[in-house]
Amino acid sequence: MFTSLLLPVDSRSGSEPVILVLGDSLSAGYGLPPKSGWVWLLERRLGERRYPFRVVNAGVSGDTTAGGVSRLPALLKRHSPAVLILELGANDGLRGIPFAEIDANLTRLVRLGKASGAGILIVGNRLPPNYGTVYTKRFQAVFEAVAEREQVALVPRLLAGVAQDWGLMQEDGMHPNARAQPLMLDNVWPGLEPLIRDRLPAARR
């Protein structure tokens, strides 16, 4: 979940309400062919189901929750999202950033999003097993604690059913390959669709 820089991209133009994805390489599509990442697949699913939203991918490879805190205010001002997906924290865990700091940053991101009027979805992650059972459980618990305390939606594990299958991972063992992306979207969708339905334009309700 390192290297590369992907600037935020508006996947469609127009006046549709925005779904803003604030993430790291797992959202930025690190190592993937164009138009194969789960965020791009999300745009396609929205079109197939006639949800009038556009997606802004603000995924930056290597980003942390602290980086997200520094980037989010400008993104909120620019895009005024109806829904904010927070997919950050994996790099914090890999770098050994204290759990209290991750918690504080995630809380700040949620509250910034709430103050802008966005519906919030936290997307949690899991660290490789070599980090040890105790550490990985405490890491995952941070996402759960913030979501419960702030009363926002949570997808506990973006890579559920993916990280355990080496056939779905790139050679670095850290990043999912193109075959994994539909599964990742399927993991996100149950938490995201209720937020989308709540924020449909009035004419569509």
Image (cartoon, rainbow, N blue to C red):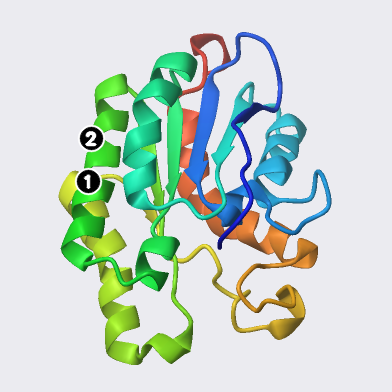
- Residue drawn at x 56%, y 68% as measured from the top left: 159
Helix, strand or loop for disc 2: helix
Give the residue type that dot 1 points to: Thr
Q: Position of residue 166 (x, y in %)?
A: 70, 84
Rendering quarter of residue 44: top right
Q: Residue 58, relative to residue 167: is it above or below?
A: above
Residues packed near mark 1 inside 10 Å, few (<14), some (14 to 19) or many (20 plus): many
Q: Which three-letter amino acid code belongs to the residue tagged 2?
A: Arg
**Callout 1: helix, strand or loop?**
helix
Q: Quadrant of the N terminus?
A: bottom right
Relative vertical location of residue 192 with respect to residue 96 in this rendering, above or below: above
Who is closer to the viewer here, 11 or 148?
11
Of residues 58 and 49, the one drawn nearer to the viewer in this rendering: 58
Q: CA distance from mark 2 to mark 1?
A: 6 Å
**Residue 47: quarter of image:** top right
Q: Is residue 202 above or below residue 105?
A: above
Check residue 111 in the rendering and tell me which mark sits there, or answer none.
Answer: 2
Is residue 71 left or right of 24 when viewed as pictured?
Answer: left
Any mark on residue 107, and which? 1
Residue 66 located left or right of residue 23? left
x, y (%) of residue 145? 21, 60
Viewer can see residue 153: no
Q: What residue do we see at 27% from left, 30% from top? A: 112
Q: Residues within 10 Å of mark 2 (few under 14, many from 20)?
A: some
Outermost residue, front side: 3
Q: Mark number for residue 138?
A: none
Q: From this viewpoint, which residue is outermost toward the right?
A: 33
In the image, taking residue 97 as reference, residue 190 lies left or right, namely right
Could you tell me if the residues under marks 2 and 1 are in contact, i.e. CB atoms within 8 Å?
A: yes
